[in-house]
Image (tube, helix red, strand yellow):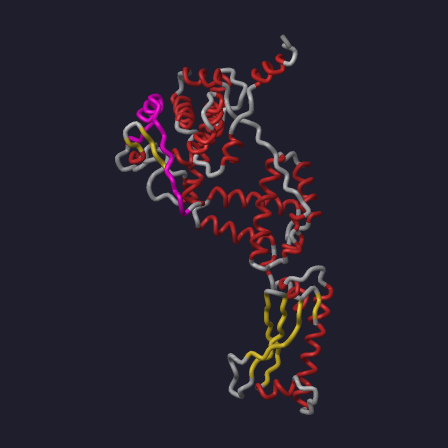
């Protein structure tokens, strides 16, 4: 029988004959290039199998087996004919009529599986991000199977997120991660490529609001001398990030004295360590005198602690390091927000703005995008360009005034 290029037949598994030299007869479902075989309750010798398949069968017991196999074939054909699009998982669910036969067709199962892989690989941040996505999906609709992810579902979920005030960028993150999970399920032949929902749904792509500071605001930060020690510490780490190629705080807290050689700092991004096995190129930073001054003021003075700054210590798990980093970033951001208010800086000053400011200031000063890409540790020029701020408001006004300057 052929439907949607699916064939139903039977197979005598001669690999494990029983004591009577009878072998198990299996139902064979074939959809090019894949096939799966399912055990029946019937057994036969090779000679009996030839008789069962002959047009002149007279043996009463073998006739019963043939009749039983015909019933199995008819049921399999009926199940396949009712499927909108064939997949082995959907066939098994309907044929065996047991939801737990293929428990691994649930969306939650595939998310949990990938989250565990990320956690074991030390990619804690990415694992937490996927956890946020599946929690969000479950709050919209729970107990979803892979087949529930249709173009209509994706559009309804997008509308739901936007209705709750989520940004286009956030919606894009959730959808890209959901797409990644669906792709993994397709690669594992759990669902058919014919059911791919993202073929008829476009993932929204919002452009991030730029977080770079103006030069005048940076000057305010450089000359500011907070009275409180905690604000000075927060400001030091923000400026250190800015001066050291916009270094992520996850990289700053992992630094060790051995990362410094003379007037240079070299390190491999933690993100790169986790996602690449080849071409692990270190980023080399020329240390600005102010950066050296900050190192001297904030460095670790505990001889038992191997880290350059006193944020981590030996023996921490990747999960603990991730939580420690997040808490430190929040600690810095709260104090930088207060400093921004004191200095009347309108732009929000978070740790991420240090990285954007580094790249954007270099761009404004005519430094090549290729150099900025290398300094940031990006593998793609597109990624770098997304970091670079657009023209400043004063430049836009200057260019607008040129439209009537027609001398």
Of residue 145 and residue 330, the one placed in the foreground of this image is: 145
The quadrant of the rendering that contains the C terminus is: top right
The quadrant of the rendering that contains the N terminus is: bottom right
256 vs 336, left or right, is left
Q: Is residue 228 above or below residue 119?
A: above
Of residue 77 and residue 308, the one placed in the foreground of this image is: 77
* Residue shown at 67% from the left, 41% from the top: 158
Residue 313 falls in which quadrant of the image?
top left
* Residue shown at 59% from the left, 69% from the top: 36
98 vs 118, left or right, is right
State the residue lying farthest toward the front. Answer: 407
Residue 134 within the segment the image draws in magenta: no
Residue 319 falls in which quadrant of the image?
top left
Of residue 151 and residue 47, the one placed in the foreground of this image is: 47
Percent x, y of residue 11 = 60, 77
306 vs 245, left or right, is left
Of residue 113 and residue 182, the one placed in the foreground of this image is: 182
207 vs 257, left or right, is right
Percent x, y of residue 86 = 67, 62
* Residue shown at 68% from the left, 80% from the top: 68
Percent x, y of residue 81 = 73, 66
Residue 284 within the segment the image draws in magenta: yes
Q: Is residue 283 above or below residue 51?
A: above
Q: Is residue 358 above or below residue 71?
A: above
Magenta part of the chain: 277-301
Q: How many marks?
A: 0
State the residue lying farthest toward the left. Answer: 303
Percent x, y of residue 62 = 66, 87
């Amino acid at each position: 029988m052929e439907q949607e290029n699916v064939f139903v037949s039977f197979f005598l598994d001669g690999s494990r004959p029983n004591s009577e030299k009878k072998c198990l007869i299996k139902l064979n479902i074939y959809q090019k290039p894949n096939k799966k075989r399912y055990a029946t309750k019937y057994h036969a010798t090779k000679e009996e199998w030839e008789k069962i398949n002959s047009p002149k069968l007279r043996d009463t017991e073998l006739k019963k087996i043939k009749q039983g196999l015909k019933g199995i074939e008819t049921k399999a054909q009926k199940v396949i004919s009712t499927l909108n699009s064939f997949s082995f998982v959907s066939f098994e669910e309907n044929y065996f009529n047991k939801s737990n036969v293929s428990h691994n067709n649930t969306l939650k199962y595939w998310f949990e599986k990938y989250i565990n892989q990320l956690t074991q690989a030390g990619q804690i941040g990415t694992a937490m991000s996927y956890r946020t996505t599946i929690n969000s999906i479950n709050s919209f609709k729970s107990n979803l199977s892979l087949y529930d992810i249709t173009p209509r579902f994706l559009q309804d979920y997008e509308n739901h997120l936007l209705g709750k005030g989520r940004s286009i960028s956030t919606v894009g993150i959730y959808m890209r991660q959901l797409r990644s999970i669906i792709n993994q399920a397709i690669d594992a032949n759990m669902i058919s490529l014919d059911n791919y929902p993202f073929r008829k749904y476009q993932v929204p792509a919002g452009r991030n609001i730029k977080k770079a500071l103006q030069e005048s605001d940076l000057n305010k930060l450089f000359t500011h001398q907070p009275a409180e020690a905690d604000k000075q510490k927060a400001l030091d780490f923000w400026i250190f990030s800015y001066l050291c190629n916009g270094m992520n705080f996850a990289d700053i807290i992992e630094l060790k004295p051995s990362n410094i050689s003379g007037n240079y700092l070299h390190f491999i991004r933690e993100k790169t360590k986790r996602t690449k096995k080849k071409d692990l190129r270190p980023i080399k930073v020329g240390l600005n005198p102010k950066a050296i001054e900050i190192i001297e003021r904030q460095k670790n003075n505990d001889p038992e602690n191997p880290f350059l700054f006193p944020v981590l210590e030996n023996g921490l798990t990747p999960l603990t390091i991730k939580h420690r980093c997040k808490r430190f970033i929040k600690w810095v951001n709260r104090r930088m927000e207060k400093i921004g208010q004191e200095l009347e800086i309108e732009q929000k000053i978070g740790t991420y703005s240090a990285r954007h400011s580094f790249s954007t200031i270099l761009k404004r000063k005519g430094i090549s995008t290729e150099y900025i890409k290398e300094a940031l540790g990006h593998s793609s020029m597109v990624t770098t360009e997304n970091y670079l701020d657009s023209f400043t408001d004063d430049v836009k006004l200057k260019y607008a005034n040129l439209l009537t300057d027609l001398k």
